[in-house]
Structures are given as C-alpha cells and as structure tokens.
C-alpha cells in the first residue's frame, strides 16, 4: 500500500544518501 511505498522510498533515500557520503569521504 501507500505506507509500503513511502517506507521503500525512505529506505532508498537513506541508502542513496549513505552511498553519497561514502563516495565523498
């Protein structure tokens, strides 16, 4: 449902942010 999509998007955003931080580090 919507909650699942929201959580999935949030998780993806967090992973993308963590990945970006690792690249910049």
Image (cartoon, rainbow, N blue to C red):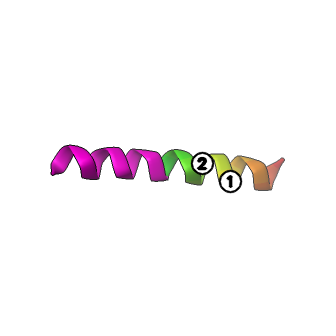
Residue 25: x %, y % from top left: 84, 47
Q: Secondary structure beneath disc 1?
A: helix
Number of on-image labels: 2
Q: Residues within 10 Å of mark 1 (few under 14, many from 20)?
A: few
| Residue nearest the observer in this picture, 7 or 16 | 7
Q: Position of residue 3 (x, y in %)?
A: 21, 43
The one of 4 and 23 positioned closer to us in this rendering:
4
Identity of the residue drawn at 33% across and 44% down: 7
Q: Identify the disc placed on residue 3.
A: none
Please name the residue shown 65% across and 46% down the image: 18
Left or right of 22? Residue 1 is left
**Side of 11 where 21 appears, left or right:** right
Residue 2: x and y in percent read 17, 49
Asked where in the image residue 16 lies, by quadrant, the reply is: bottom right
18 vs 15, left or right, is right
Q: Whole-Å distance between the Cαs marked 1 and 2?
A: 5 Å
| Prevailing secondary structure of the magenta residues | helix
Q: Is residue 11 left or right of residue 22?
A: left
Residue displayed at 15% across by 51% down? 1
Q: Mark 1–mark 2 contact, CB under 8 Å? A: yes
Residue positioned most to the left: 1
Please provide the residue range marked out in magenta. 1-12
Question: Which residue has dot 2 on it?
Answer: 17
- Where does label 1 land, which residue? 20
């Amino acid at each position: 449902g919507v909650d699942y999509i929201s959580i999935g998007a949030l998780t993806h955003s967090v992973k993308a942010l963590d990945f970006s931080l690792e690249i910049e580090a």
